[in-house]
Image (spheres, rainbow, N blue to C red):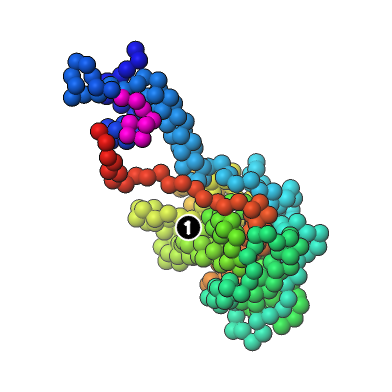
């Protein structure tokens, strides 16, 4: 039949009466008085069917997008890195294998798509040690002075990216001589024996496709902001306890395990509803390859081995990079915040790679929100 009652129209549309009335007032659905009851209206079947199909398609797209932004499929195309079949690769090169010999400077060159290692000038002479606060302040000071990223050649962006890395390196790996970043870190902490382990960790953490901090950096770059602004966005995001600062929960678990034993510490944490970021990773159902690659060359302290054994049995997930990085820091008696310092220094290379790739693309990242608030008042009826 060519006309529907309001009940029939609402059933087909799957909406509230207010939305039906709004579509009538905007001319999307034709309506006429019901001959049997002029106080009611009838709605054109063709208009209702067409709008119902369009709304169904939109809802499907919205559902897919909502799922994708929460551990779903990648939402942006990128040629920089990916996790596939349990392996992490940088531009097609296996990151775990790369960590066997490469420096962070070499890994960064690969991520940036240039044929040589990046150049990070020495800096931070006289600094008391690696400082995340100094890095944040130094980047913030650069933002108003640097040039926007959009519309510039890749060679110009690479040159500025190296300068941004010098700013970051001066704060996170201060040093007075032109030596690799991992050695600068080891020397600044007076732990030269930790140099090779730090090198491996830096390479393994240099990038990890579209994680939260990288997505933040890309959104910033998509607006045409400076490379320093993109790195600042990434660094701020990294400090969250569900991301780069997850090491704190691992260290806290280790402290508890020393007092009560690993099994009891894990049981208490789970009983209190606490999340244990030391175990599992959605992208590595068979175990975090980065943790495996790092701990193949660093023997964790005994308490961490106990936590690993008990946790993997109780939780059913294998240890991840947050566990491995914290265990490495304890093994070499590094400062308590060393895991975050290492993570931040490494990932700055990845953020810059993504910021440059985004700038080349030249489009704004602007998702839509699915409104869940009060019903919006509309006229008509």
Magenta stretch, main secondary structure, is loop
Q: How many numbered marks appear?
A: 1
Which image quarter holds the C terminus? top left
From the image, which quarter does the N terminus lie in?
top left
Whether residue 305 is situated above or below residue 138 in the rendered picture: above
Quick one: 319 or 9, which is closer to the camera? 9
Question: Is residue 157 in view from this perspective?
Answer: yes
In the picture, residue 325 is in which quadrant? Answer: bottom right
Q: Position of residue 146 (x, y in %)?
A: 63, 71
Task: Determine if the magenta segment contains residue 138.
Answer: no
At horizontal 45% and vertical 37% (from top left) the residue drawn is: 63
Residue 206 location (% of width, % of height): 66, 60
**Position in image of residue 23 (x %, y %):** 35, 33
Q: Residues within 10 Å of mark 1 (few under 14, many from 20)?
A: some
Q: Which residue is mark 1?
A: 242
In the picture shown, does residue 9 fall above or below 230? above
Residue 124 higher or lower than 282, as above or below? below
SS at badge 1: loop
**Where residue 175 sits in the image (x, y, percent)?**
69, 80
Residue at horizontal 61%, vertical 74%?
145
Is residue 42 depicted above or below 324 in this figure? above
Is 379 positioned to the left or the right of 274 in the image? Answer: left
Extent of the magenta region = 24-31
Q: Nearer the viewer, residue 263 or 208?
A: 208
Left or right: 132, with 106 as reference point: left
Observer-nearest of 187 and 318 = 187
Work out whether residue 103 can be spotted. no
Decide which of 170, 79 is in the foreground and name it.
Answer: 79
């Amino acid at each position: 039949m060519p006309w529907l009652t309001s009940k029939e129209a609402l059933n087909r549309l799957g909406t509230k009466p207010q939305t039906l009335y709004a579509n009538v007032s905007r001319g999307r659905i034709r309506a006429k008085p019901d001959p049997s009851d002029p106080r009611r209206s009838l709605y054109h079947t063709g208009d209702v069917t067409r709008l119902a199909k369009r709304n169904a398609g939109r809802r499907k797209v919205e559902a897919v997008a909502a799922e994708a932004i929460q551990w779903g499929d990648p939402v942006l195309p990128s040629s920089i890195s990916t996790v596939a079949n349990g392996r992490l690769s940088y531009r097609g090169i296996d990151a775990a294998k790369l960590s066997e010999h490469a420096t962070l400077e070499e890994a960064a060159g690969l991520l940036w798509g240039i044929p040589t290692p990046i150049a990070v000038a020495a800096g931070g002479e006289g600094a008391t040690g690696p400082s995340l606060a100094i890095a944040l302040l130094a980047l913030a000071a650069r933002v108003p002075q640097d040039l926007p990223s959009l519309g510039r050649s890749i060679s110009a962006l690479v040159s500025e990216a190296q300068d941004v890395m010098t700013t970051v390196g001066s704060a996170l790996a201060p040093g007075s001589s032109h030596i690799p970043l991992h050695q600068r870190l080891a020397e600044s902490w007076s732990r030269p024996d930790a140099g090779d382990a730090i090198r491996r960790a830096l390479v393994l953490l240099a990038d990890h496709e579209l994680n939260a901090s990288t997505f933040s950096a890309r959104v910033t770059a998509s607006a045409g902001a400076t490379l320093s602004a993109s790195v600042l966005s990434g660094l701020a995001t990294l400090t969250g306890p569900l991301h780069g600062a997850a090491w704190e929960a691992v260290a806290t678990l280790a402290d508890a395990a020393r007092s009560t034993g690993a099994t009891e510490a894990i049981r208490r944490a789970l009983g209190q509803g606490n999340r244990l970021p030391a175990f599992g990773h959605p992208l590595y159902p068979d175990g975090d390859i980065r943790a495996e690659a790092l701990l193949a060359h660093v023997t964790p302290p005994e308490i961490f081995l106990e936590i690993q054994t008990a946790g993997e049995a109780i939780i059913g997930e294998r240890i991840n990079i947050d566990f491995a990085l914290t265990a490495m820091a304890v093994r070499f008696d590094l400062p308590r915040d060393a895991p975050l310092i290492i993570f931040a220094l490494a990932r700055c290379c990845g953020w810059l790679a993504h910021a440059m790739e985004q700038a080349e693309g030249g489009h704004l990242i602007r998702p839509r929100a699915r409104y869940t608030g009060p019903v919006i008042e509309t006229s008509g009826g």
